[in-house]
Image: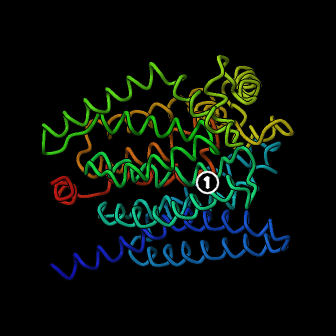
């Protein structure tokens, strides 16, 4: 029995490393590209290729190992995806170019991560690997942020990738600071939030906000007094910030300006107007198309075709899903998705609920204002973990993890 447990933990560690590897490698790649560009050395393509090879080898190796124990599940997942893509390819002839472009990110990145997430048996092992990976991501992201501020590198006034990479350690450390009342992890979180505010996007701030709200709402540790204390403290601080956020951000903005630092995100937060960075025109175009074609929608990749030259994708998961599958099927898919998420939030317990809240905040929330669920690796990890905990993991395993 003990040997079997060790084997399971060993497998889960390998699966967890495979899940976190793309984010660690992408962060290091971003760091290297930013620094090498200042040296005038033209090896960006080599670094990008090497990154893809490393991630590809790790994911391929993990999937091959999984084929030995869970071949049927993998075949069913890929068979369903292939069938869906084939149907879309036949029906939406005008989307074929864009469907072809989606093959690599979906079938060779997102689906492998989805399948691996389905096979995690010990959430504690995944959490441990996430924590260790977070320190690596945090180190390279913070060093790069400091380099940008002091002028060693130039990643621009705004960096979406940097804030996306920093989001993972920020939420992992925030979770630790709330659960353990850890000053160390709180400090690390505040530092990363500071750099996200300066160099990152509003989407990352939204994800952090949603995480804090959900974490406090569903905080249910064994110590009831501690739970109450944390909730009261957070509510007080959040309330004070809400009523004074403009004054606080303005003082921070003045401090940054006095030190020759511009922050696009803080400027947008201070603005009285709702600036959607052109998303409003994207939404109008796609919604108009859906209204004109309610049954079929625009198909998978259709938003890329319609927005060609204006934007890359829909920037909203609701519009994208309804557009991909039509009004009836799209609404049904969204209804099922939100039902499962709500069920998980209100019925999962302990580490399982914590894991879902973290990955919901990392891989789902931002899809309402950016990216595309089709190519978002974090989204497919979230869905994989959601299905895994709800339908695959045994009752005994869940009870042990919730102790």
Residue 22 in sight here: yes
Residue 221 location, x and y as percent?
A: 18, 44
Residue at the (66%, 33%) spot, across then down: 323
Q: From the top left corner, tell me how far across and down residue 141 is, in percent.
A: 58, 59
Of residues 162 and 329, which is closer to you in this image?
162
- Image point (48%, 75%), residue name: 62
Tell me if residue 48 comes above or below residue 394 in the rendering. below
**Image quadrant in which the N terminus is located:** bottom left
- Say which residue label 1 marks: 83
How many numbered discs, if any? 1
Vertical relation: 330 (above or below) 127: above
Note whether 113 is above or below 352 in the view shown.
below
Quadrant location of the C terminus in the rendered image? bottom left
Q: Point out residue 52 in the picture as x, y percentages from the top left corner.
A: 67, 71
**Percent x, y of residue 307:** 80, 35
Point 57% across, 45% down: residue: 196
The image quarter in which residue 326 lies: top right
């Amino acid at each position: 029995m003990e040997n079997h447990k060790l084997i399971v933990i060993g497998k889960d560690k390998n699966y967890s490393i495979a899940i976190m590897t793309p984010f660690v490698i992408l962060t290091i790649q971003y760091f290297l590209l930013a620094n090498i560009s200042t040296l005038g050395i033209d090896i960006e393509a080599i670094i990008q290729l090497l990154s893809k090879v490393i991630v590809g080898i790790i994911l391929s190796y993990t999937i091959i190992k999984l084929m030995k124990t869970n071949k049927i599940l993998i075949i069913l997942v890929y068979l369903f995806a292939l069938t869906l893509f084939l149907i879309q390819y036949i029906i939406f002839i005008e989307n074929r170019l864009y469907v072809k472009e989606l093959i690599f990110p979906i079938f060779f990145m997102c689906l492998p991560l989805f399948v691996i997430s389905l096979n995690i048996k010990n959430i504690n092992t995944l959490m441990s690997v996430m924590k260790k990976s977070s320190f690596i991501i945090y180190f390279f992201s913070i060093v790069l942020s400091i380099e940008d501020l002091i002028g060693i590198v130039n990643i621009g006034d705004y960096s979406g990738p940097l804030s996306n990479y920093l989001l993972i350690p920020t939420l992992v450390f925030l979770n630790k600071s709330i659960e353990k009342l850890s000053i160390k992890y709180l400090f690390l979180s505040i530092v990363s939030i500071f750099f996200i505010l300066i160099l990152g996007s509003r989407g990352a701030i939204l994800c952090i906000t949603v995480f804090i709200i959900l974490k406090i709402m569903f905080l249910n540790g064994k110590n009831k007094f501690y739970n109450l204390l944390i909730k009261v403290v957070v509510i007080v601080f959040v309330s004070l910030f809400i009523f004074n956020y403009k004054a606080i951000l303005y003082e921070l903005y003045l401090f940054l300006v006095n030190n020759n630092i511009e922050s696009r995100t803080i400027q947008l937060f201070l603005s009285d107007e709702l600036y959607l960075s052109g998303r409003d025109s994207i939404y109008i175009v796609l919604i108009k198309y859906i209204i004109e074609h309610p049954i079929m929608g625009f198909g998978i990749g259709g938003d890329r075709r319609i927005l060609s030259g204006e934007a890359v994708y829909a920037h909203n998961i609701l519009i994208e899903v309804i557009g991909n599958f039509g009004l009836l099927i799209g609404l049904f898919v969204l209804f099922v998705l939100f039902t499962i998420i709500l069920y998980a939030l209100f019925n999962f317990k302990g580490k399982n609920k914590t894991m879902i809240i973290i990955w919901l905040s990392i891989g789902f929330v931002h899809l309402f204002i950016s990216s595309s669920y089709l190519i978002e690796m974090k989204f497919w990890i979230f869905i994989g973990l959601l299905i895994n905990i709800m339908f695959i993991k045994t009752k005994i395993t869940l009870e042990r993890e919730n102790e």
